[in-house]
Image (tube, grey):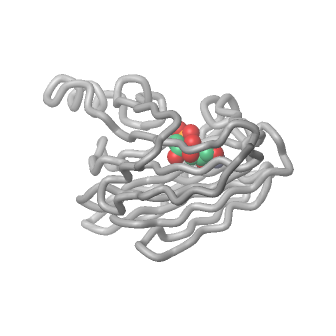
Amino acid sequence: MMLPVGVAIDPKSGAMGQATGRYAKHLGETRGCYQDQAAVDALLAARGDLPVYEVVEFIQPGSDIIFGTTTMSPGQVGEEFFMTRGHFHQRRDRGEVYYTQSGRGVLLLESRQGESRTVDMVPGTCAFIPPDWAHRSINTGDAPLVFVWVCNADAGHDYAEILTRGMRQMVVKRDGAVALAPNPRYAA
Ligand code: F6R
Ligand code: ZN
């Protein structure tokens, strides 16, 4: 039987009291996300295969809901920032919620038709991700970005599309400011 439970989450680290799963993504395995491959190589040579983000999950067996935290390291690759791979959900009728706990970032969203939107990720902001919008989080600050996410357990992940076509927009640091720029590699 499923029982109610309160799961403690450290807002600064994303650590969860009763994790049922976790994984980490490092720079090397996410290199295809970035425009500037020479900058990826230079960073790998200088700092090694840095951890970019860690995901910790909580689900009760049989539950239709899963939640967890994503904790993103700060970092820049060329003019871009450390980012998640980004995905659509396999089930096109499944949305998601991202609640930022600490740090600062941008949630970059893109509809199946290629329409772009952003939501600022600042502590206390709860972002609604509609069904069938791809989503990628980007740490634009100089501290870890920690957010809690909640979605249906059967949502699934479809990484292939974003991997292949990229996202229409990039989040970059230009002239000391965080800005949106069109992605030259976007294959509409
Ligand atoms: C789940 C979800 C998040 C991300 C996580 C890592 O649907 O959106 O848990 O999976 O932030 O990002 P990706 O999966 O894009 O590498
Ligand atoms: Zn998702």
Point out residue 97 in the picture as x, y percentages from the top left corner: 64, 61
Position in image of residue 153 (x %, y %): 72, 42
Look at 43% across and 37% down and name the residue there: 35
Measuring from the top left, give residue 93's x and y in whole percent: 86, 51
| Image-quarter location of ligand 1 | top right
Up-down: is 35 above or below 74?
A: above
**What is the x, y in percent for residue 115?**
72, 59
- Using residue 121 as the reference point, say whether residue 141 is left or right of it: left
Q: Residue at x 38, y 41 (%)?
A: 53
> How many numbered marks, from 0 up?
0
Q: Along the horizontal axis of the image, is 85 left or right of 8?
A: right
Q: Is residue 42 visible?
A: yes
Image position of 127 with respect to 67: above or below? below
Q: Is residue 17 above or below residue 175?
A: above
Q: Is residue 85 visible?
A: no
Residue at point 30% right, 60% down? 12
Residue reaching furthest bottom? 124
Residue 27 versus residue 102: which sits nearer the camera?
Answer: 102
Q: Residue at x 68, y 54 (%)?
A: 110
Left or right of 165: which side holds 75?
A: left
Image quarter hosting the N terminus: top right
Quadrant of the frame with the C terminus: top right
Q: Is residue 85 placed above or below 122 in the rendered structure?
A: above
Give the quarter of the image for residue 45.
Answer: top left
Closest to the observer, 5 or 84: 5
Q: Residue furthest right?
A: 93
